[in-house]
Image: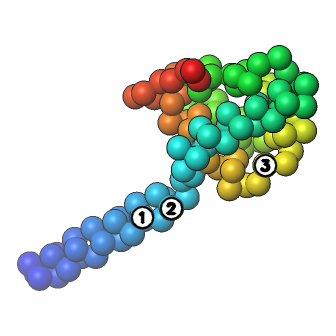
Amino acid sequence: MFRKTLLVLLTLMISISFADFSFASEAGNKRKGKYTYRKVYESCQKRGAVETAKPKINPDAHTQAEWTKIFKEKKFAEFGCAEEWSKLSDEQLKDIYSYLHDHASDSGTPAKCN
């Protein structure tokens, strides 16, 4: 009986650890996301669409749930620079999402773009 319980418990623990690894690989690179987010606005400024290269929206402008909704629905009109946003790959969007989500107003480390 003890061996059977131990086997079930170990199987469960291994399954949970593999699930954690698969979720971790889904996340984007938030450092790349911060860089890409800033580059979007730099190229937008060079094109003359905005006055400053500073991003229009700070990560702490929304909660994590709000960022998730914005990126899930791909509603980027609020950001401006539609031409630049339309050129971003899914990987770049995932990176930007990770940066904004991880530094949202309700995160452990809210951030403003400096």
Q: Residue at x 57, y 52 (%)?
A: 28
Q: Specify which label sits upstream in the sequence, 2 or 3.
A: 2
Horizontal side of residue 107 vs 47, given as left or right: left
Q: In this view, does 73 lie above or below 19?
A: above
Instruction: Please give the label number shown on residue 88.
Output: 3
Q: Do the residues labelled 2 and 1 touch (CB within 8 Å)?
A: yes
Label ID, residue 90: none
> Where is residue 6, by image quadrant?
bottom left
User: In which quadrant is the N terminus drawn?
Assistant: bottom left
* Contact check, label 3 and label 1, Cβ < 8 Å: no
Seen as rendered, the residue at the extreme front is 46
Give percent across and percent down for residue 97: 63, 41
Given residues 88 and 69, the one toward you in this image is 88
Callout 1 secondary element: helix
Q: Which amino acid does label 3 sit on?
A: Leu
On screen, residue 78 versus residue 35, left or right, reads right
Secondary element at tag 3:
loop
At label 2, the amino acid type is Ser
Which mark, by number, is residue 21?
1
Residue 98: tell me if it is visible: no
The amino acid pointed to by label 1 is Phe
